Image (spheres, rainbow, N blue to C red):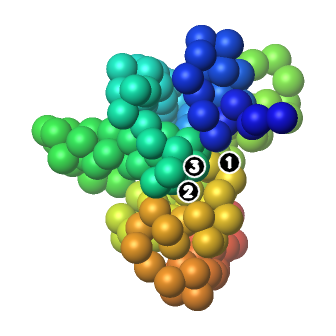
């Protein structure tokens, strides 16, 4: 039985791939840009580009998820390249949230705090964390995407997570 995520040619296959990959691509962008609405827009752009370019996908070169995350990485790079203004960390506006459940409020607060801490990391560290924890990719898959060794990816992730942990505890 063929895995639809390896060869999305038919519309039914595409729907299945979309449902399977949507959360991973969305969370990749959440970690990458730290803004839910922007993550949704960039996710939509990624799937639109993938849909339009689906006939160019060659399964003999890479798995579908690798191809799709290649598109997502380019969409992120385009966003950051075209972004006209860089806001200082002090100007980051906290998002208003009014869910009735205290847990949801705490989770939103923690995510905003994490987003600010992620902005302090180097671009490469943010990208690797986005691929690891947002897109739920393995170090081997990440290494393939970014052209680093698997060991190097693991080392950078380890150091970046330790930096985040230390800053979280210091500022908490």
Could you tell me which quadrant the C terminus lies in?
bottom right
Q: CA distance from mark 2 to mark 3?
A: 16 Å
User: What secondary structure is found at the residue carrying circle 3?
Assistant: loop
Per the rendering, the mark at residue 63 is 3
Per the rendering, the mark at residue 131 is 2
Residue 96 place in picture, x, y as percent? 56, 24
Per the rendering, the mark at residue 110 is 1
Which of the 4 image quadrants contains residue 138? bottom right
Mark 1, Cα crowd under 10 Å, few <14 / some 14-19 / many 20+, is few
Nearest-to-viewer mark from 3 and 1: 3
| Observer-nearest of 97 and 58 | 58
Q: Residue furthest top?
A: 11
Which of the 4 image quadrants contains residue 107? top right
Would residue 87 be found to the left or right of residue 63 on screen?
Answer: left
| Observer-nearest of 70 and 124 | 70
Residue occupying image coordinates x 46% and y 54%: 61
Q: Is residue 117 visible?
A: no
Residue 67 place in picture, x, y as percent? 47, 45
Mark 3, Cα crowd under 10 Å, few <14 / some 14-19 / many 20+, is some
Q: Give the vertical position of 99 relative to 166 (above or below).
A: above
Q: CA distance from mark 1 to mark 2?
A: 20 Å
Residue 31 place in picture, x, y as percent? 54, 49
């Amino acid at each position: 039985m063929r895995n639809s995520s390896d060869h999305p040619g038919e519309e039914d296959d595409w729907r299945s791939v979309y449902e399977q990959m949507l959360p991973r691509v969305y969370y990749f962008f959440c970690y990458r840009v730290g803004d839910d609405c922007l993550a949704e827009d960039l996710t939509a752009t990624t799937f639109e580009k993938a849909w339009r370019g689906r006939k160019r996908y060659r399964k003999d070169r890479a798995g579908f998820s690798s191809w799709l995350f290649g598109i997502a990485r380019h969409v992120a790079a385009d966003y950051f390249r075209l972004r006209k203004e860089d806001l200082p960390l002090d100007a980051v506006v906290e998002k208003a949230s009014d869910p009735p459940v205290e847990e949801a409020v705490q989770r939103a607060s923690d995510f905003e705090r994490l987003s600010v801490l992620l902005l302090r990391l180097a671009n490469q560290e943010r990208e690797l964390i986005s691929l690891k924890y947002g897109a739920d990719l393995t170090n081997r898959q990440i290494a393939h995407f970014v052209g680093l060794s698997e060991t190097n990816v693991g080392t950078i992730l380890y150091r970046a997570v330790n930096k985040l942990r230390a800053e979280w505890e210091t500022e908490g």
